Amino acid sequence: MDIECLPFDRTGYFSELICDYLKEKESLRSFYHRFPNLENFREQIQEKAKTFPPSHREVLYEALQKQYDGVDLTKKTETHIRQLKEPITFTVVTGHQLNLFTGPLYFLYKIISTINLTLELKASYPKYNFVPIYWMATEDHDFEEINFFNFKGKKIQWNPDNRPGGAVGHLSTMGLEEVYEAFANELGNNHSASTLKELFKKAYLEHNTLTDATRYLANVLFGEYGLVIIDGDDVGLKRQMVPYVKKDILEKTGFQKVSETISGLEALPTKYGIQVNPREINYFYLTNGIRERIIEKEGRFYVNETEIEFSKEELLKELADHPESFSPNVIMRPVYQEVILPNLCYIGGGGELAYWLQLRSTFEAMHVTFPMLTLRNSALVISKKQYGKLQRLNTSTADLFLKQSSFINKKIREISNIDIDFAPQKKYLEEQFRALYDLAEQTDKSFLGAVKAQEVKQKKGLDKLEKRLLKAQKRKLGNHVSRITKIQNELFPNQSLQERTLNFSELYLDLGDDLIPLLMKKLKPLHLEFLVLTY
């Protein structure tokens, strides 16, 4: 597998905030704790070792033993779970929704980035143990975001007759037989297709809930690398979160601190935009098919869209008796994660890191160590056949990242035997108008506006003529335009990054069991560039 690298800020697909973070821009320095390089992990290890209670390790171990009951564990994962009891063991975490059959391709990239970082850390700090963690977002309730995956341009979708509310992890897998049949019919009958069919069937038709199905799937794909899969929807783990839930609900800590951070971001010269806004209470009430916001009105607490309500005393009793009923939102879930795990680093996509960068002061107010933040690997995977087409079309992989209209215009200019670039004419026009401005200045300054209007008019005329000539040349070179747009659409479906649309199954059909090992060799989480991989 060959590899090319492209700076993230040259792809056009990553926000200015993330690009500036990767450049360690000074204005963002106060929004994170330590930048993710190997040397900085030394202090992160020392800090987390001092602040993570040994008792939390016992609770974590017991929770994982229960969650893995009945799961076919690899020796490496079993060893990792056991090592979590030891004070020299730390974690690297990524999280993801319970997307049907993993959803978009970057599910793999997230987990592989996480595993590979633990391997790099072990090589640099051999006296410690490092465990890769996949945090299943079992408590999410956005079913429409996870009930499908794309395969060869088609949407394979799950539409249960009675979609209950509440956490998606609780969903029954009943009804997924129809999805299996639809997917199987699209796959074909080669060896890789048979493997995918068996994997889907065992995950979704032989497990009762979406949580169990996703755990099985991730374990089969990554168990040999020692991945540990954790479900935060756990009474034992949530009991450790009780003091932090109180601070958020009673003292509005999350709301106050994130609001302050937002003000700080908005005051920066670069306007980055805000990823998430806090609520006064950043918890949902979770029970019996319900996951609804907790709202305070005049000293009483209400569960939105229900008739459930509590006094302050009743709410605190409910929290003490049933901590599992309190589900953190996007603001407080990161705090929960860092409270229960001996974690050093979170690996996520650009959107995730953007909201993590709003949370440092919240962590400080709650006396929880803020993790290092690493952007997951991103990659464009190209087959040799597709790469051959690009060469025949004299198209670089960097060209593919252009917006399609710019991509076409660039290629038309390159291949056309007519030079349709009016830049010299525009420059000549500007020189002529400079002389006219001087003349107007010396005679009557009131003519300056008229000269300016004439300049604008003539430039617009040149722009319009240039566009018409390009359009005519596109028609003339229609076959070439069709071929370059076809290859770009193949590699950038819906004019978006491949990893955000494609499901891993399409690559698996070509590469089979070699897919994950090949990606494991190429994805390096601290190598902060976009990768183009040709197989």
Image (cartoon, rainbow, N blue to C red):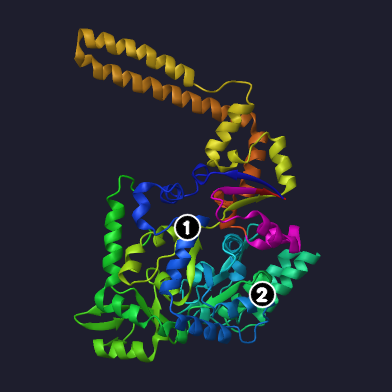
Q: Main secondary structure of the magenta part?
A: helix
The type of residue carrying mark 1 is Asn
Regarding residue 338, the answer to whether it shows in the image is no
Instruction: For label 1, count other residues whose C-alpha is less than 10 Å away and answer few (under 14), some (14-19) or many (20+).
Output: few
Residue 83 position, x and y percent, is: 58, 77
Q: Nearer the viewer, residue 227 or 515?
A: 227
Mark 2 highlights which residue? Answer: 76
Residue 99 position, x and y percent, is: 56, 69
> Is 461 placed left or right of 480 in the picture?
left
For the point 40% across and 61% down, the residue is 355
Q: Which residues are magenta?
A: 503-532
The type of residue carrying mark 2 is Lys
Label pair 1/2, CB-CB below 8 angstroms: no
Mark 1 highlights which residue? Answer: 40
Q: Nearer the viewer, residue 311 or 109?
A: 109
Residue 138 position, x and y percent, is: 50, 76
Q: Secondary structure at mark 1?
A: helix
Regarding residue 72, the answer to whether it shows in the image is yes
Residue 119's place in the image compared with 409, above or below, is below
Number of numbered markers: 2
Mark 1 or mark 2: which comes first in sequence?
A: 1
For the point 53% across and 86% down, the residue is 62
Q: Secondary structure at mark 2?
A: helix
| Residue 508 colored in magenta in the image | yes
